[in-house]
Image: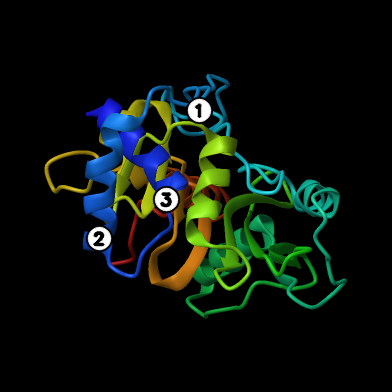
Amino acid sequence: MKKTLAAAAIVIAAAPVPGSAQTLSIKVIQRIGARKEAPAALPTAATPQGGSGPETLAFPLDVAGVRLGMSASEARAALVKAGYAMPATSGVSYGPSFAARVRAEAAQRRTGAATSPAMTDRVMTQLQGVGPNRETITVGLTAAPAGGSTVTSVHLTMPQDVMKGDVFLRQVVAKYGRPDGSRDQGMTLAWCSAPLKSVCGTITPFQRRPGALPNLTASVVYNDNTIRLQDGTEQGRDRDRTFAAAVDGAAPKTDRAAF
């Protein structure tokens, strides 16, 4: 199955993307036999990141030099190096720091009165840039327990009136190597974290989903060329548990009620 997916990805990258997904699928099937050599397989990383157990690996892929886990300043520097214009204020969003959120939640637990986290203690939560060929990129960041914020998602869009879908996919495969899976009749290619490579590109209720761990998809569906790099749902749940534990530490729950 992996050989078939690899062949399909290369054929897609080499052929124009037609208006019909069915036509694309037929062309892929017709030309699979012509492929002689697969691209190099993706490298896998085994550098653990904190907080998610043994299956949390440093995801090796980047978008315009931006990787998951980077700080806001590192992400900005990577985008500037890649040729993106970075407005000083436009496209930049801020939110409360991890500590500010914990303080507000702990105060509400003590008093019952809802309070908003202080924005005097804030971190960057979104960063946008515009590339040299009308690429647009949005970097999502999440407040980190140690302070500041780290990259948890990257979304790039390249208009198809600037770059055809087949050319876009050809560059994607050249950069990231053989995809681990595909869907949408081969118009969406997927790369997954090592433990989930075997199910990458598939979604069934009977298995662990590819999006459970960090992943990247590239797509030419809906007349847009897009790349999405994002943290997994399991990392999101880990962050929720870390936040809940911090609130418990700041405002421990009582073990007695007055009755």
Q: Whole-Å distance between the Cαs marked 2 and 1?
A: 38 Å
Q: Is residue 45 left or right of residue 258?
A: right
* Location of mark 1 (residue): 57
**Which mark is drawn over residue 23?**
2
| CA neighbours of label 2 inside 10 A, class few (<14), some (14 to 19), many (20+) | few
Taking the view exactly as shown, the residue that stands out farthest to the left is 206
| CA neighbours of label 3 inside 10 A, class few (<14), some (14 to 19), many (20+) | some
In the image, 94 versus 158, the foreground residue is 158
Residue 60's quadrant in the figure? top right
Q: Amino acid at mark 2?
A: Thr
Visible residue check, residue 196: no
Q: Position of residue 172 (x, y in %)?
A: 54, 45
Tell me whether the residue at label 2 lies in contact with that at label 1, contact meaning CB atoms closer than 8 angstroms: no
Looking at the picture, does residue 211 appear above or below residue 101? above
Q: Quadrant of the C terminus?
A: bottom left
Q: Is residue 48 left or right of residue 192?
A: right
* Location of mark 3 (residue): 15
